[in-house]
Amino acid sequence: MGKRDDLIAQYADDLKNKCGMTPDMDLLTKVTIGCGPAIYDADASTVAGSQAGEIETVKNNFLMKKLGLSDGPELDAAISKVIQTYGQSERNKYRAVIYYMLTKHFGKEAVYG
């Protein structure tokens, strides 16, 4: 297994044990690949849930640009809900896991079709 496969296994473990979800491995793999080289960078691979700038980045670059959603309070609410699900005190909130949960939340799996 390569480094990406190891990371996908880590993300699946987080989804199962920290978020209480059974991951769709095909979708999780596609979301992880979609994150690009960021998954290999310690800082870029995680989302700082308490930083407003980081939340804006997730909203603008992922929800609006990648998933094609329109800006509105429901985007902030969804990000907040996903961070709560992951665990506010969880130190490493992996970007791929957050993006996976947001993709599921908005029913946008087709974007990765």
Image: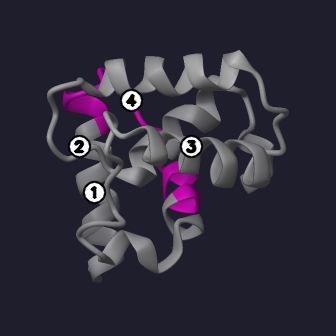
The alpha-carbon separation of the residues under discs 1 and 3 comes to: 27 Å
Q: Earlier in the sequence, mark 2 or mark 4?
A: 2
Taking the magenta stretch, the answer to whether it contains residue 27 is yes
Few, some or many residues within 10 Å of mark 4 (<14, 14–19, 20+): few
Q: Secondary structure at mark 4?
A: loop
Which residue does the numbered mark 2 point to in the structure image? 13
In front of the other: 14 or 35: 35
Task: Please give left or right for residue 86 compared with residue 103 in the image.
Answer: left
Q: What amino acid is labelled 4 in the image?
A: Thr
Q: Residue 52 in the image: state x and y as whole percent.
A: 44, 38
Three-letter residue code for mark 1: Ala
Pick whichever of labels 1 and 4 is earlier in the sequence.
Answer: 1
Tell me how far mark 1 sits from mark 2, CA to CA: 6 Å
Q: Nearer the viewer, mark 2 or mark 3?
A: 3
- Residue 59 within the segment the image draws in magenta: no
Residue under pointer 3: 56
Q: Which residue is mark 1?
A: 9
CB under 8 Å between callouts 1 and 2?
Answer: yes
Which residue corresponds to mark 4?
Answer: 22
The residue positioned 46% from the left and 21% from the top of the image is 80
Q: Label 2 sits on what residue type?
A: Asp
Q: Are marks 3 and 4 in contact (CB under 8 Å)?
A: no
* Closer to the eye: label 1 or 3: 3
